[in-house]
Amino acid sequence: MADIDLYGAFVPALLVWALLAFLVSLVVRRLIGALGLYRLVWHRPLFDLCLYLVCLGGVVSLAGRLT
C-alpha cells in the first residue's frame, strides 16, 4: 500500500479511499431514499453498511486500475 503525502504528513491511501467511498455512499443513499427504495430493505443500517463496503471495493478497484 502506498502513502499519500499531505503537506508533510503521510496518510495511508486506504484512509483516503475510505473517505471517498463514504462520500459516494452518501450520494447513493440519498438517491435510494429519494426514490423510496428503502421500503424494500429489511434492516436499513445493515444495508447501509453493505452499501458502504461495496462502494469502498469499487473505489479501491478503480484506484488500482488508475495507478
Image: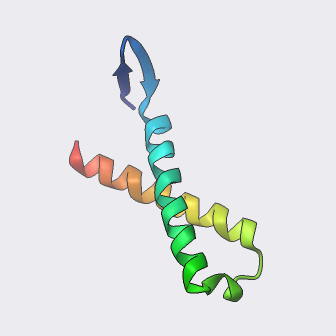
Identity of the residue drawn at 50% across and 36% down: 15
- Which residue reaches farthest left? 66
Query: Is the image coloured rainbow, by chain, by secondary structure, or in one colour?
Result: rainbow
Identity of the residue drawn at 57% across and 68% down: 29
- Which residue reaches farthest right? 43
- Please tell me whether residue 34 is drawn above or below residue 10 in the rendered image: below
The percent position of residue 18, horizontal first and vertical second, equals: 50, 44
Q: Which corner quadrant of the image does residue 8 belong to?
A: top left
The percent position of residue 7, horizontal first and vertical second, equals: 36, 14
Identity of the residue drawn at 46% across and 58% down: 24
Q: Nearer the viewer, residue 47 or 37?
A: 37
Q: Is residue 1 left or right of residue 45?
A: left
Quadrant for the N terminus, please: top left
The percent position of residue 48, horizontal first and vertical second, equals: 65, 65
The percent position of residue 10, horizontal first and vertical second, equals: 42, 18
Identity of the residue drawn at 52% across and 61% down: 25
